[in-house]
């Protein structure tokens, strides 16, 4: 039973399309994150939600919109995809001062 | 601006060798330093260090923090091919919305 699960694992799409990535956690944690990992392996925070409320919105283009329908879910919707959006996107939850990561979604924009 | 710098960026050794990975940090309101191992997918937690000079151990892995010199090291003894991964270091703030600042990782390759 996976603690933090993301779907899809792989996403290949054309420039200009709109896509969504879903994240679900069964750890009961209040705080969830979206991170982007680029080709150089830097993990950068994009958004943070605490109990369905947006806490952090880093300098991310407004084409990216997170949505948290409930405490266990944090989805990421991306409009008008660009080549530079290609990366691995990780969902994570926070508990006991540690992050627990999902397995990532590899997004390739062609 | 807070930053975490890891070195080396890449390391290739033979099975059985001992390696030391470095992490230096400049994090305001510093609370703790965390190490993660990333193989193919999700980073998995290794250690959280809060106090200086107290070594944390897990099998062949160990880590220590120096809060005066603002760095941490991760040691792996008797390396195995399964240790091949990217090792990420992150500094955590006491306060602030973005609590974890990640370094760029060290890619460790263990050759048989």
Image (cartoon, rainbow, N blue to C red):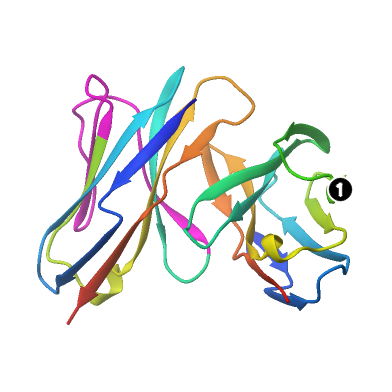
Queried whether the magenta region covers residue B58, the answer comes back as yes
Q: Residue furthest bottom?
A: B112
Q: Is residue A72 left or right of residue B16?
A: right
Queried whether the magenta region covers residue A108, the answer comes back as no
User: Residue under mark 1: which chain is it in?
Assistant: A
Taking depth in this image into account, of A70 and A59 the one nearest to the observer is A59
Q: Position of residue B97 (x, y in %)?
A: 64, 27
Task: Residue at 40% x, 29% y: name it.
Answer: B32
Quarter of the image where one finds residue B87: bottom left
Taking depth in this image into account, of B10 and B110 the one nearest to the observer is B10
Residue at numbered disc 1: A67
The total of numbered circles placed on residues is 1
Task: Residue at 19% x, 58% y: name it.
Answer: B60
Q: Assign the C terminus of chain A to one quadrant of the image.
A: bottom right
Q: Is residue B85 left or right of residue A106?
A: left
Q: Position of residue B90 (x, y in %)?
A: 43, 40
Task: Residue at 42% x, 68% y: name it.
Answer: B39
Q: Which residues are magenta?
A: B42-71
Q: Is residue A84 above or below residue B22?
A: below
Taking depth in this image into account, of B107 and B37 the one nearest to the observer is B107
What is the secondary structure assignment of the residue under circle 1?
Answer: strand
Q: Position of residue B77 (x, y in %)?
A: 13, 59
Quarter of the image where one finds residue B91: top left
Q: Is residue B20 above or below residue A56?
A: below
Q: Position of residue B67 (x, y in %)?
A: 27, 22
Q: Is residue B46 above or below residue B13?
A: above
Task: Residue at 51% x, 21% y: name it.
Answer: B94
Q: Assign the N terminus of chain A to one quadrant of the image.
A: bottom right
């Amino acid at each position: 039973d996976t603690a933090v699960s993301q779907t899809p694992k792989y996403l290949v799409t054309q420039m200009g399309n709109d896509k969504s990535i879903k994240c679900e956690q069964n750890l009961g944690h209040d705080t969830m994150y979206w991170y982007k990992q680029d080709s150089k392996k830097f993990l950068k925070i994009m958004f943070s939600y605490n109990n369905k409320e947006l806490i952090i919105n880093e300098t991310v283009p407004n084409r990216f919109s997170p949505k948290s329908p409930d405490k266990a879910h944090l989805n990421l919707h991306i409009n008008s995809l660009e080549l530079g959006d290609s990366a691995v996107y990780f969902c994570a939850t926070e508990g006991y001062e540690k992050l627990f990561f999902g397995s990532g979604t590899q997004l390739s924009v062609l | 601006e807070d930053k975490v710098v890891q070195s080396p960026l890449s390391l290739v050794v033979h099975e059985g060798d001992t390696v030391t990975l470095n992490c230096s940090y400049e994090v305001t309101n510093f609370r703790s330093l965390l190490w993660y191992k990333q193989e193919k997918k999700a980073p998995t937690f290794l250690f959280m260090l809060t106090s200086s000079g107290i070594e944390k151990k897990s099998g062949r892995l160990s880590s220590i923090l120096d809060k005066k010199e603002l760095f941490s090291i991760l040691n792996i003894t008797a390396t195995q091919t399964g240790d091949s991964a990217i090792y990420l270091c992150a500094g955590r703030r006491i306060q602030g919305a973005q609590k974890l600042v990640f370094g760029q990782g060290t890619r460790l390759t263990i050759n048989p």
